[in-house]
Amino acid sequence: MSPVIKFIRPAGLLDRTRASQFNQEVNKCLEFTSDVESKADIVLINFKDVTFMDSSGLGAVVLAIKTVQGAGMHIYVCSLNNQLNMLFELSGLNKVIEIFRDEEEFKHKFCSKK
């Protein structure tokens, strides 16, 4: 049985005003939404459309990692621009979470037939 993968695709600024909304999206991935749709085994955050992240946004990402991993699930990120990549390196998050170049690289690892 293949894992249930949920995708989160924030856009624009990930700052204090959007951090709460971002964390709500993460929490939705961890819930059973219906008999058809189950909670995630894996959460991928695709930052392709994020133009800027401040410390509040970074804090929201740290909380997302703790929440998902605390629930016994896996979380990954992809498509970091230069600013986000620098934030992940300076904060050490690049050592805590696996970062993929883009969604295609992620899908190749987790969605390919075995």
Image: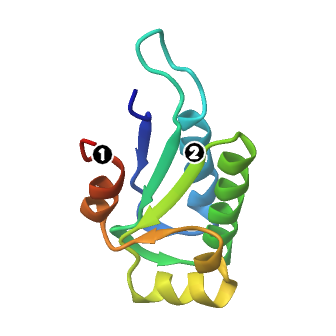
Q: How many marks?
A: 2
Q: Nearer the viewer, residue 50 or 37?
A: 37
Identity of the residue furthest to the top in this view = 35
Residue name at image x 53 percent, y 37 percent: 41
Residue name at image x 58 percent, y 81 percent: 88
Q: Is residue 75 above or below residue 114?
A: below
Q: Tell me, yes or no, whether the two marked residues, 1 and 2, touch with CB atoms within 8 Å.
A: no
Q: Is residue 66 above or below residue 97?
A: above
Place of residue 17 in the rendered image (x, y in percent of width and height, measured from the top left): 60, 61
Quarter of the rendering containing residue 65: bottom right
Q: Going by the image, does 65 lie left or right of 18?
A: right
Point out the tag, 1 or 2, that comes first from the N-terminus.
Answer: 2
Q: Nearer the viewer, mark 1 or mark 2?
A: 1
Q: Going by the image, does 108 lie left or right of 38?
A: left
Q: Nearer the viewer, residue 78 or 19?
A: 78
Q: Which mark is residue 22?
A: none
Kind of element beneath mark 1: loop
Look at mark 1 in the image and give the residue it sits on. 111
Place of residue 93 in the rendered image (x, y in percent of width and height, measured from the top left): 64, 76
Q: Quadrant of the C terminus?
A: top left
Q: Going by the image, does 2 lie left or right of 108?
A: right
The kind of residue tagged 2 is Val
Q: Is residue 7 above or below residue 59?
A: above
Residue name at image x 53 percent, y 90 percent: 86
Look at mark 2 in the image and give the residue it sits on. 26
Q: Nearer the viewer, residue 73 or 33?
A: 73
